[in-house]
Image (cartoon, rainbow, N blue to C red):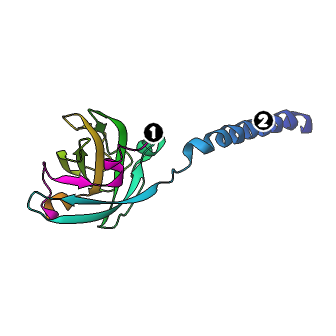
């Protein structure tokens, strides 16, 4: 009996070692990205100014992670995505727990499209509809509460600085 158990234990041991090596190789890919922070203001056409502290999603990995897996976000916080170019942008809410307002912003800082209260966990595509260079994500309902509309302007060192990294 002992001789029959040894090969089975070796197979289990080998499988566990292979699983460990696989997971160790995936660890960097699964690591949470870190984000720099910055300040921005939204200036409405009526002259109101709303200040936010935002995390900056500048790299492809940061943009891919975005606000996924976040359970809370303060009312005066958000995330600014910089694409490094002007193009049509497609977003989704997979693995995102918070309803979000998405403000699609052109290279000059003008808000071109607003998608309010994007549904958490939805895989539906959210389309900028026009070429943009940035997307600002805020808590759902913020745009309506503050009276933010298309044509309003976003002021930020990232936007005036040409968009950050690609």
Which secondary structure lies at badge 1? helix
SS for dot 2? helix
Residue 119 in the image: x percent, y percent? Answer: 25, 49
The one nearer the camera, 38 or 99, is 38
Q: Between residues 12 and 109, which one lies in front from this camera angle?
A: 109
In the image, residue 68 above or below residue 129:
below
**What is the magenta range?**
146-166
Main SS class of the magenta portion in the image = loop
Q: Residues within 10 Å of mark 2 (few under 14, many from 20)?
A: few
Q: Is residue 93 or residue 80 the one in the foreground? A: 80
Q: Which picture quadrant has residue 39? A: bottom left
Residue 149: give x, y in percent of width and height.
Answer: 12, 53
Quadrant in which the N terminus appears:
top right
Q: Name the residue under label 2.
A: 14
Could you tell whether 157 is left or right of 4 in the image? left
Q: Check if residue 33 falls in the magenta segment.
A: no
Residue 81: give its label: none
Return the x and y of residue 31 as percentages of the image width and height.
56, 48
In the rendered image, is residue 123 in sight?
A: yes
Does label 1 or label 2 sit earlier along the sequence?
A: 2
Q: How far across and down, in percent of the image, does residue 69 sit?
A: 42, 53
Residue beneath the point at 22% across and 58% down: 42
Q: Kindly tell me whether residue 97 is visible in this rendering.
A: no
Q: Which residue is drawn at 41% across and 57% down?
A: 70
On screen, 110 above or below 85?
A: below
Spatial CA distance of label 1 from label 2 is 36 Å
**Residue wearing tag 1:** 60
Say whether residue 156 is magenta.
Answer: yes
């Amino acid at each position: 009996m002992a001789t029959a158990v040894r090969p089975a234990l070796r197979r289990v041991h080998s499988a566990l070692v292979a699983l460990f090596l696989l997971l160790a190789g995936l660890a960097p890919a699964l690591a949470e990205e870190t984000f720099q922070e910055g300040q921005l203001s939204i200036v409405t056409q009526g002259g109101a100014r709303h200040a936010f502290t935002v995390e900056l999603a500048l790299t492809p990995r940061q943009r891919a992670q975005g606000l996924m897996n976040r359970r809370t976000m303060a009312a005066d916080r958000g995330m600014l995505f910089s694409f490094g170019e002007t193009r049509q942008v497609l977003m989704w809410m997979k693995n995102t727990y918070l309803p979000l307002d998405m403000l699609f912003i052109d290279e000059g800082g003008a808000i071109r499209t607003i998608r309010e209260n994007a549904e958490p966990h939805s895989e539906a595509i959210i389309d900028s509809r026009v070429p943009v260079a940035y997307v600002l994500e805020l808590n759902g309902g913020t745009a309506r509460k503050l009276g933010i509309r298309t044509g309003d302007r976003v002021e930020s060192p990232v936007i005036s600085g040409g968009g950050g990294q690609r």
